[in-house]
Image: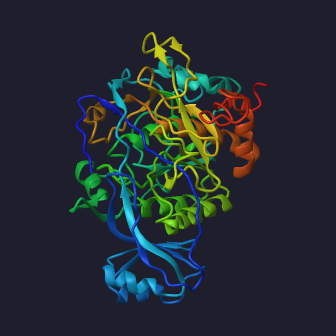
Amino acid sequence: MRLYAFPTILIAALSTGCADPSAPNPGAPVAVRSATSAEGAGVTGRHLIRFHGVPARGFAERVAALGGRVEWLRAGLATVSGLDAAGATALAGRKDIAAILDDVAIPLDEPLGRVAAERSAADLPMTPAAPQAAFFFARQWHLRVVGADRAWAAGNLGRPSVTAYILDTGIDGTHPDLAGLVDLTKSVDLLGTFTVTAGGVATSFTESDTVARYFPGAHPSTDLFYHGTHVAATISSNAVAAAGVTSRTTLVAVKVCAYLNTCPLSSVLRGVLHAADNGADVINLSLGGGFAKAANGALVGLVNTAFNHAASKGSTIVVAAGNASTDLDHNGNAYASYCDAPGVICASATGPAAAAGVNGPWTDADARAAYSNYGRSAIDLAAPGGTSAAPVWAACSRTSVLVPVCQAGAFVIGLGGTSMAAPHVAGAVALLVPELGRNPAAIHDRLRSAATDLGQPGTDPYYGKGRLNVARALGIEN
């Protein structure tokens, strides 16, 4: 597990990927399995379970008798804590269980570079009706390149009735760019208490205790990292320091990643189900990991169950392609979640090749970001993810313990990665929901057909159907 010192802000991003095998036959014996995941991952001490349909009556009591506790159970999935190896093996023998495996905690990707945090002038007004008036808008090349400014000029600012659920490190709703936009009645911390064992070393986490210790009175879903706040403000912002794709979309924080750089898969899957069951219009996952498909067909089955459930509820899911420069058409036995989960919109990253200055002009703003994963079978759209020449700018968490300078005011940070590309697409989804309804397939088709075709004609391995074009998707431009 890596911890970082932050003399300057690190450009950060998370990885994702793709695949799909079959589940065990109903009634067949099920082995307890471990997920072979990304480097640096560890097991959490929890177990993930997928059922054959509805679990048999008395399941919780049976788990308790084996020394465990059911953390959550919904949509044919569950997480159980407190079981030893013998208890897990005994539970695996039940006929109602299709798969049981060790939960894994996957770290966020290594940051890509460095860029200083910057503070906006004090006491600036909110400008949600005119996001281009934000203090740092001049450097937000990424919003202009997708036509967000042209969408605003035509009155497309988003609606509070549309909800974007951010599955990430949390959101700092006290930042001026986010004040009043985060629905704390729906926001949750789904991490709970878990122990990560990696390399023979066990570390226990209870993030809500850390929030209470350092920021008394703060909501448990507040962002102690900085990543989730940046992602959220890219989707929707009051446009005090920096603008977002929208300025009126309601944000919901679903904390599934701890500030000490780990995201339990059990929390991520629970987050997808929680968002879908609470009416999420769009779900953004700028995170991921990986494992071997052949060894972990059961894990693929769990992921697919959660994502299919979300689609059935009308939630559109946007995910990041990942930052390993990997060809997802030819990645062998690797499953780099969540690009190939069913029904998602997978976003690769673009960014300028060069910039004359922080406010531009920029050279080739639609250049493929060298770090971005790619592949015709995986990438739906490209969107601005940023480069070392020109990062994506958005709010920095005022509750970040990793970037403490951001606690002092309305700071923004420039980050780069496919994590930053995904929320541009999620913001576009939020603008389309009032027109197309909670219809993931229709929204997916509209975004793909409206994209600016780049690279090879048609479907390109780096750009998919093209670079996101918000103005064209809304019918403002041909």
Point 58% across, 23% down: residue: 366
- Quadrant in which the C terminus is drawn: top right
Q: Position of residue 450 (x, y in %)?
A: 73, 33
Say which quarter of the image contains residue 193.
bottom left
Q: Position of residue 383 (x, y in %)?
A: 58, 32
Tag count: 0
Point 70% across, 45% down: residue: 444
Q: 442 or 154, which is in the foreground?
A: 442
Residue 170 lies left or right of residue 271; in this view the side is left
Q: 179 or 118, which is in the foreground?
A: 118
* 470 up-or-down from 150: above or below: below
Residue 328 visible, this orientation: yes
Q: Position of residue 140 (x, y in %)?
A: 50, 22
Q: 121 or 394, which is in the foreground?
A: 394
How is colour applied across the structure in the image? Answer: rainbow
* 135 up-or-down from 36: above or below: above
* 387 up-or-down from 331: above or below: above
Q: 77 or 290, which is in the foreground?
A: 290
Q: Position of residue 401 (x, y in %)?
A: 26, 42
Residue 179 visible, this orientation: no
Point 39% across, 48% down: residue: 169
Say which quarter of the image contains residue 12.
top left
* 452 up-or-down from 220: above or below: above
Say which quarter of the image contains residue 227.
top left
